[in-house]
Amino acid sequence: MTNQSKEGAFYQRDRGWHPPAYTPPYKTSVTRSPTKALISVDSTLSEIAGPVFNQNMLGELDNDMIMNFAQPGEMAIGQRIIVYGKVMDENGKPVPNTLVEVWQANAGGRYRHKKEGYLAPLDPNFGGCGRCITDEDGNYRFRTIKPGAYPWPNGVNDWRPAHIHFSIFGSGFGQRLITQMYFEGDPLIWKCPIVGAIPSKEAVECLIAPLDMNNTIPMDSRAYKFDIVLRGRRQTLFENRMEGL
Amino acid sequence: MQELKHLKETPSQTAGPYVHIGCVPNFCDIEGVYPNDLGDSMVNDKTKGERITVTGTVYDGTGTPLKDAMVEIWQADAEGLYPGKDPRDQADPNFTGWGRKAGDYDTGEWVFETIKPGAVPFKDGRMMAPHITFWVVARGINIGLQTRMFFPDEAGANAQDPLLTRIEHQNRVSTLIAEKTGDGAYRFDIRLQGEGETIFFDV
Ligand SMILES: [Fe+3]
């Protein structure tokens, strides 16, 4: 109920670990990157608090992208996979009851979007969106098809590695994060200017989901594990500080 | 020496041009999966407080509007309480505090219908001026940008706001003050770069 009353401000974000705003090989960043220094402020209630979503807002097929846009009796085309993982914070503490939203291209690398012009065909039974809320232990899971790689207009021959976009809320608005999950063994990962915006190989590895043969469904779906880490909180009691402790 | 066992935060990646598919699918014509887009509506008939609209556009460094941005806002209710889990008290149950809008495909403009927030205390007990927290993502933005909108009709509170007063370049503070365009109507444009670059926070 009053979860955050026991939890304090967030750890400062390690800006050298995240991609910087200005990364010229990813051309769109050039005019969309602030040039002035961010103003640093310790978290206030406006970041410590955050919107709450309830399990009861979810539909039965929200986390099943093979079925949630399919016509009756049909299903999305592609390699069937399960993507699962745990949302936790920098202290390793699970983040329960948080909303995880995902979106992706279809098996041919085509998005269902009016501004998308890639010649690969749309799959009439694949929408491309899914969502779930983490359980008490921070776990989430959804079922989908493996997205295809696709070309994009950056260089004349740039291809995105297969990926799934993730949006995560956390327990406070200061934890808000959007990222992308990649698949183990994809050679395009190391050629992608968007991935390359991340400064270190070690940080990129955090976005690569390994194949997990222990969590497959035999004769049905393979599994990929993708754990997500959000900013950690200091232990300080917020109210106590307000009272002068 | 012992190890500190802190994990590293998952690195951010751009939301890309198709953030709509995952976050506002009905807006981009993917219908029938979710009944409505989350964050589309923040208020209902019973919400307490002064109704306002906040309209704006996100501009890049060349002055071109972003037509693929997604903007989220987060704010307190009319009494200054955050919906959800505010440790101080129960916020207005008829107010969500959180809104999400995609820019219009042709103009890039977005509009939030909300209420004017009450003041919220800073950690030392001083009051912060009424404000709305903004979070902006788009293609080309590698990590979500956070800023705050303040109200032009709160000059006194703004002059004492703990965040605004700590900004060294006071000539930039105006980038955080919305423009009043009518009764209960505010305009808050966000400039990513160049002249009038909006102040962004690391908070
Ligand atoms: Fe993508």
Image (spheres, helix red, strand yellow):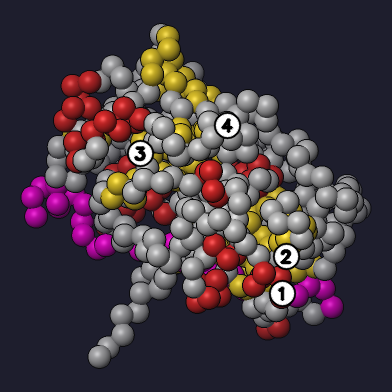
Circle 1 marks a residue in which chain?
Answer: A
Mark 4: secondary structure: loop
Q: Compare residues A76 and B17 and report the one nearer the observer.
A: B17
Q: Compare residues B92 and B1 and report the one nearer the observer.
A: B1
User: Looking at the picture, which amino acid does disc 1 mark?
Assistant: Asp
Mark 1, Cα crowd under 10 Å, few <14 / some 14-19 / many 20+, is few
- Residue A47 locus on image (x, y percent): 34, 47
Mark toward the viewer: 2 or 4: 4
Q: Is mark 3 within 8 Å of ligand 1?
A: no
Mark toward the viewer: 3 or 2: 3
Residue picked out by circle 1: A186
Quadrant in which residue A84 is drawn? bottom right
Residue picked out by circle 4: B64
Is A240 contained in the magenta span?
Answer: yes
Identify which residue is drawn at 68% across, 27% down.
Answer: B106
**How many labels sit on residues?**
4
Identify which residue is drawn at 37% across, 64% down.
Answer: A14
Q: Is residue A243 left or right of residue A179?
A: left
* Separation of residues labelled 4 and 1 (CA atoms): 35 Å
User: Looking at the picture, which amino acid does disc 4 mark?
Assistant: Thr
Quadrant in which residue B166 is drawn? top left
- Residue A201 locus on image (x, y percent): 53, 75
